[in-house]
Image (tube, rainbow, N blue to C red):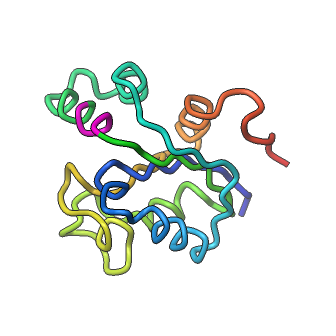
Amino acid sequence: MPVERTLSIIKPDAVEKNRTGAILAHLEEAGFKILALRRTHLTRAEAEGFYAVHKARPFFGELVEFMTRSPVVIAVLEREDAVNAYRKVMGATDPAKADAGTLRKLFGSSVGENAVHGSDSLENAKIEISYYFPGSLVSPTA
């Protein structure tokens, strides 16, 4: 399988609960290499731009409010089959339905506050990575 990259966001709920280190350790134990990492407090414009695909959905405003309420930690992850592997490690969107041992089961509390975001396709991973890590902030793929 090819080595891929994907984007991970540790959401405000998990950062507020001081779970960043535990989540990053979990990712490294799952075989991910952390290529880039930053902690930031998203502006409204950044959150609206990133989630623009959901603009017409009823939860858009609530999502933007949530993602801007406190800092997030954004990472570029790399490993074989990174997108699919990270989706498995994250677990179902609803922590109550997520498999045991997944990030959302361990650290999420609801559908709206589910601890982490991950790219849903290789194409979106490239778009999302460039949104938060433009230009030379992440080394090119080997």
Q: Quadrant of residue 101?
A: bottom left
Name above or below for residue 5 compared with residue 87.
above
Residue situated furthest left in the rendering: 58
Name above or below for residue 80 compared with residue 36.
below
Q: Whole-percent x and y of residue 97?
A: 21, 69
Q: Nearer the viewer, residue 42 or 60?
A: 42
Residue 126 included in the magenta stretch of the image: no
Identify the residue shown where x is 27% and y is 31%.
Answer: 64
Identify the residue shown where x is 38% and y is 54%.
Answer: 116
Residue situated furthest right in the rendering: 142
Q: Whole-percent x and y of residue 81?
A: 63, 60
Quadrant where the N terminus sits is bottom right
Relative to 15, is 23 on the left or the right? right
Relative to 132, is 70 on the left or the right? left
Identify the residue shown where x is 52% and y is 37%.
Answer: 124
Relative to 75, is 5 on the left or the right? right
Residue 67 included in the magenta stretch of the image: yes
Identify the residue shown where x is 19% and y is 27%.
Answer: 61
Name above or below for residue 49 compared with residue 97.
above
Q: Quadrant of residue 83?
A: bottom right
Task: Give the magenta part as a residue range.
Answer: 65-69
Marker count (numbered): 0
Relative to 25, is 96 on the left or the right? left
Q: Whole-percent x and y of residue 74?
A: 52, 46
